[in-house]
Structures are given as C-alpha cells and as structure tokens.
Amino acid sequence: MHQCRYPVLCLLAIATVFFVCASLVHARPIPGTLRAVTYTVEPGDSLWAIARRFDCRVSDLRVLNDCKSDLIRPGQVLFVPRLTYTVAQGDCLSTIAHKYGTNVRDLKAANGLESDLIRAGQVLLLPSYIKPRISRVSEDGLLIRSISEEELDLLVRLVHAEAAGESYIGKVAVAASVLNRVDSPDYPNTITDVIYQVVGDSGYQYTPVANGRINQPGDAEAAMAVEAALAGWDPTGGATGFYNPRFTNDTWVRSRKVVAVIDNHVFFI
C-alpha cells in the first residue's frame, strides 16, 4: 500500500491569489489558528463560479452556508470550504507545511509567494486538498470543536497507539475518522463511546482498547494531529474507520468502500 498523492496547486492558484486577497474577509485573525475562508459576493457571482475559483464543491458551499436555494446577492458574505492559517510568532513555511500535511512549494503556490519570508499575523491560504470539516465553523469563521480535556487525552492516546509508526498526516487521518464516527448516525455520539464501543462477540472496535495500549500516554505529534483534526482537517475525505490489511482478515471492514489509503492504513466508510 502506498500513501495517497495530492495535486499541486500551480498556475491556477497563483492566478487567483490576487482575487483571494481582495475578496476574503478575516474576522480578527488569531495567530496559530485555522479559519474557514469568508468571501463577499460580487455582482455577477454564482455559487458555481465561487466553487470553481476556490476549488471546492457547490454542495459544500450550500451546506456550509445553509443555503435553501442557489440564489446569492452582491454583498452577501459566504463561508468557503477552504482553510486559512494565521501565522504565529516563530512560524516558518516548513513548520506550517509539516503541521498540516502539505509542503512549502504548495503553500507558496497557494499564496503567490516568491520567497519563504512570512510574518506573524499574516494570513495564509492552505492548499485546496486540505479539506475542512464543513459543518464545524463559528459565526466569525473560527474552526473550533469543543471537547473535554478527558476526551482530548483519550483521543490523543488512541492516535498514538494506532498510528505511532505512521506519518503525521496518517495520525491526523486516524483522529479525523474517529470524529467522523461521532458525527455519523451509525455510531455513538461521543468520542469516549466511539472508542470504547463493543460490537457483538467481536469485542472492541479499536485494537489498542482490547490490548491495553490505550492506557499508554500519547506524544506531542499525536496531540498536534488531534488538534488539526479538531480544527477541521480531514485527510480521508470522510472515513469512519480504518484497518491495516496486513493485520486483519475481517470480512466486514474489507467489504466497506475505500476512500483513502494513507501509509499502512486503509480508510473506509
């Protein structure tokens, strides 16, 4: 199995960066945080045209803005399912790229940057393949998902136990799949209940719960990956589960629809 490859934003992203800078609205950027992009509708705009400019889907625009129809009006402010990152003191392009599973080249292309110089407070547009969790956005665009300290620690421990040997993006993917289960009507609606769910006679959903590794503390990278997933990044595109094909012959998981292969894990819905 190999890790999914992501497209590079080239001439299209560079050509649109001036449009982006002119049209985005940023509500009190907070250094080190992710926000959904907000866009002010201009005369002649349509949802289709906006989706094309920001490399997203019309259906996501509808959901994110609770649109009852495709009618929009000039001056209307829409959330766009793209993410911005506000540069914090001490950040550089390489650390930001590592944190969100991209690379310096794509970050520079997405923002039309000709050098690696950035400054604290600067707002960067993340590449379009870093998809936000479209239903999780506050009125001012801040992507925050509130969970208790106990559930945060539990999710960090699970990610560490399940993905200690995986890449950073693989860790984010594991965390995101758990959150997708919480959001799904087919699974329990809390992180704790999802992680400790027992199904029939087969035992726990997650191997680390069965073998006790869930009780070992997580590490800094697992914590960072969980924070990225909570902020809205889902590298899997909506997966609700995963497995390592080398270690399972479970017919149910292997019958599920595969949505991503990242490192040694197959992610499914």
Image (spheres, grey):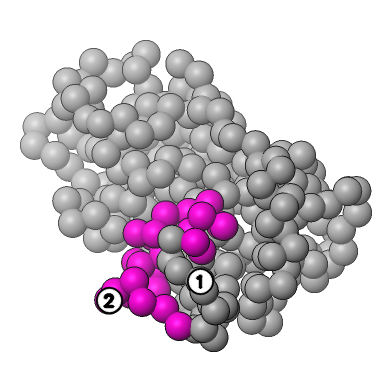
State the extent of the magenta-drawn residues as a range.
Answer: 49-73
Q: Is residue 221 above or below residue 179?
A: above
Q: Nearer the viewer, mark 2 or mark 1?
A: 1
The amino acid type found where label 1 is placed reads Asp
Residue occupying the point 8% across, 37% down: 200
Give the left or right position of residue 181, taking residue 81 as reference: left
Place of residue 62 in the rendered image (x, y in percent of width and height, measured from the top left): 35, 67
Judge whether residue 223 can be spotted in this image.
Answer: no
**Is 61 a magenta residue?**
yes
Determine the secondary structure under disc 2: loop
Image quadrant in which you'd find residue 134 = bottom left
> Circle 1 sits on which residue?
45
Total tally of numbered discs in the picture: 2
Give the left or right position of residue 133, taking residue 108 as reference: left
Place of residue 58 in the rendered image (x, y in percent of width and height, measured from the top left): 39, 59
Which badge, 2 or 1, is on the more N-terminal residue?
A: 1
Looking at the image, the residue that sits furthest to the left is 200
Give the left or right position of residue 172, taking residue 117 as reference: left
Residue occupying the point 56% across, 73% down: 38
Q: Quadrant of the N terminus?
A: top left
Label 2 Cα neighbours within 10 Å, binned few <14 / some 14-19 / many ≥20:
few
Place of residue 159 in the rendered image (x, y in percent of width and height, measured from the top left): 47, 41
Q: Is residue 21 above or below residue 115?
A: below
Place of residue 35 in the rendered image (x, y in percent of width and height, measured from the top left): 59, 68
> Circle 2 sits on which residue?
68
Give the left or right position of residue 201, taking residue 18 as reference: left
As drawn, the label of residue 26 is none
**Is 97 a magenta residue?**
no
Image quadrant in which you'd find residue 266 = top left
The amino acid type found where label 2 is placed reads Lys
